[in-house]
Image (tube, rainbow, N blue to C red):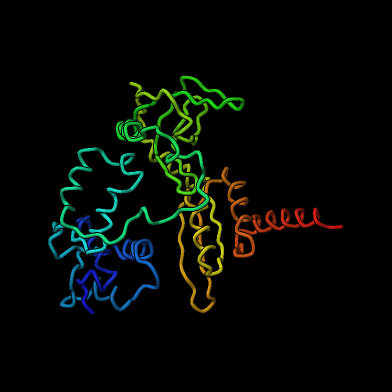
């Protein structure tokens, strides 16, 4: 086994991440990070070697006061493989690039990848069933807006905006403190999570319905990120699905759940994909609708209350076809 050959070993990126942090890790920290960052079944022989706790057996970390301390220098350059270099260059042809990168960064990317030969492009990837009224269908330039919201998040400042949809709702001069920007491939939309001080709650808005956005001088003194994490912890639910290993079903599954945090693994014995999706409590109706849209390719494993609701809806739908 070539431990430091990043083309042959998945542990290279993992160890690089730990060393770049320059932190000390307890055994509990190591177990948590292994589960979080390493895909597939962990190889405990490798883990026990990397995090050896016996004197004379240390390879990368040594034990000091019950913590693993890096032996190696933690300042080393990022090394990109051929596919990574090609992927970086392919960003230049991506239809979203100007929403995420500044002109200066794009110019630097062009210069750095000038001599990279690419025989494929992301433009060749067809994404089906995307919402027609999304980012790519608008001429609106989201880059400056995202930069403004990112500045508000960094400086704990409020933004003021209008949010109007004809015959549905009309909000003018609303002031909120943004904490997160998300993007959904399926919906081709950006969403902004923010704290609304008048209602004392966190809300989400589609960025394409927000207009006249500007930065306010109002500052939230407390750490909203901490409050938001507490909010997520209290309101987050998890659903587990088994998905048949059919290419179009897997593709659709990842697309419809693109808004959500998720984990996936393949069970060889069962020949199934197990998908765990984390969602907010008030998104439950949307989650149920998305699960039903997968039809017989998906089996809902848990939670029990969602199983009952899906069963109720399927039963109600079947009665519509009774003679």
Instruction: Indicate whether 95 appears above or below 82.
Output: above
Instruction: Residue at 34% x, 24% y: name it.
Output: 215
Instruction: Indicate whether 95 appears above or below 60.
Output: above
Residue 74 x, y percent position in the rendering: 15, 58
Residue 177 x, y percent position in the rendering: 40, 30
Taking depth in this image into account, of 136 and 77 the one nearest to the observer is 136
Rendering quarter of residue 168: top right
Residue 231 x, y percent position in the rendering: 48, 42
Rendering quarter of residue 312: bottom right
Taking depth in this image into account, of 15 and 161 the one nearest to the observer is 161
Taking depth in this image into account, of 237 and 48 the one nearest to the observer is 237
Q: Which of the image's four quarters has the N terminus? A: bottom left
Instruction: Residue at 45% x, 48% y: name it.
Output: 185
Q: In the rendered view, does 83 fall on the left or right side of 74?
A: right
Instruction: Residue at 36% x, 33% y: name it.
Output: 141
Taking depth in this image into account, of 57 and 180 the one nearest to the observer is 180
Residue 196 x, y percent position in the rendering: 47, 29
């Amino acid at each position: 086994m070539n431990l430091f050959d990043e083309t042959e070993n998945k542990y290279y990126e993992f160890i690089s991440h730990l060393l770049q942090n320059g932190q000390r890790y307890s055994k509990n920290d190591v177990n948590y990070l292994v589960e979080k960052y390493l895909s597939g079944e962990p190889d405990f022989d490798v883990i026990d070697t990397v995090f050896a706790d016996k004197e004379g057996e240390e390879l990368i970390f040594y034990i000091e006061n019950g913590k693993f301390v890096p032996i190696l220098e933690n300042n080393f350059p990022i090394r990109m493989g051929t596919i990574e270099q090609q992927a970086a260059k392919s960003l230049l042809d991506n239809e979203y690039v100007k929403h995420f990168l500044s002109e200066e960064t794009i110019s630097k990317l062009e210069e750095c990848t000038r001599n990279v030969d690419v025989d494929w492009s992301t433009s060749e990837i067809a994404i089906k069933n995307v919402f027609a009224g999304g980012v790519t269908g608008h001429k609106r330039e989201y880059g400056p807006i995202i930069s403004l919201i990112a500045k508000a998040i960094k400086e704990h400042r409020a933004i003021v905006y209008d949010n109007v949809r004809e015959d549905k709702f009309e909000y003018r001069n609303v002031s909120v403190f943004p904490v997160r920007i998300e993007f959904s491939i399926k919906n081709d939309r950006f969403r902004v999570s923010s704290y609304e001080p008048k209602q004392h709650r966190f809300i989400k808005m589609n960025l394409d319905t927000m207009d006249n956005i500007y930065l306010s001088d109002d500052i939230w003194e407390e750490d909203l990120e901490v409050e938001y994490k507490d909010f997520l912890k209290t309101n987050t639910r998890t659903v587990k699905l088994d998905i048949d290993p059919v290419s179009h079903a897997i593709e659709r599954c990842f697309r419809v759940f693109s808004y959500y945090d998720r984990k996936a693994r393949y069970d060889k014995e069962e020949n199934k994909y197990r998908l765990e999706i984390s969602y907010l409590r008030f998104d439950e109706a949307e989650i149920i609708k998305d699960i039903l849209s997968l039809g017989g390719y998906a089996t809902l494993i848990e939670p029990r209350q969602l199983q009952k609701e899906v069963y109720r809806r399927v039963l109600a739908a079947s009665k519509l076809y009774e003679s």
